[in-house]
Amino acid sequence: MKKNKHYGLQRYCYAKTLLFVAIAFILSGCATMFTDVKITKAIEEKRIYVGMTMDEAMAVIGRKPLVAVDKLSGEKKEDGTYAEWSINGGGMGGNLMGTYTLVFKDGKLIEWRYSQ
């Protein structure tokens, strides 16, 4: 059986890509853990509060919703427009702690929940 002359290079590139993906996955889990700690501290310090806007919440949390790790959904009802931002609760975040869900009505925070 004749081996491809680029076989060694292909294995090296495959191993390098696999290592990069593994490191990225591990780091995304660490990032979600640090976000959980940041939000918990902000709630304790009353920097996240009922009535704040989503822009204000993003400023406190330090980022916008991320497709890879968060879930953002919305629904229009008779009494207003609702949006839920589940931080670290969707995608491939590898969440180590729990999920905070911020619920907004007409752009203002009305409640938040924590689940593990």
Image (cartoon, rainbow, N blue to C red):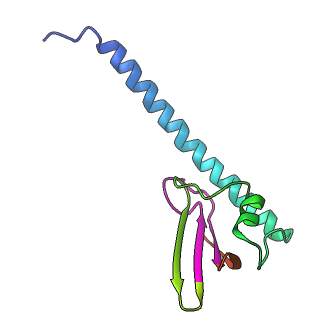
Q: Would you say 93 lies left or right of 54 here?
A: left
Between residues 64 and 100, which one lies in front from this camera angle? 64
Q: Is residue 99 above or below residue 108?
A: above
Q: Residue 81: give x, y in percent of width and height.
A: 58, 81
Magenta stretch: includes residue 36 = no
Quadrant the N terminus occupies:
top left
Q: Is residue 12 above or below residue 50?
A: above
Between residues 97 and 57, which one lies in front from this camera angle? 57
Q: Evaluate whether residue 116 shows in this view.
A: no
Q: Which residues are magenta?
A: 81-104
User: Splitting the image into 4 quarters, where does residue 70 fall?
Assistant: bottom right
Q: Evaluate whether residue 75 shows in this view.
A: yes
Q: Residue 15: give x, y in percent of width and height.
A: 41, 25
Taking the view exactly as shown, the residue that stands out farthest to the left is: 1
Quadrant the C terminus occupies:
bottom right
Q: Residue 20: give x, y in percent of width and height.
A: 50, 32
Between residues 57 and 26, which one lies in front from this camera angle? 57
Q: Residue at x 33, y 13 (%)?
A: 8
Q: Residue at x 73, y 71 (%)?
A: 53
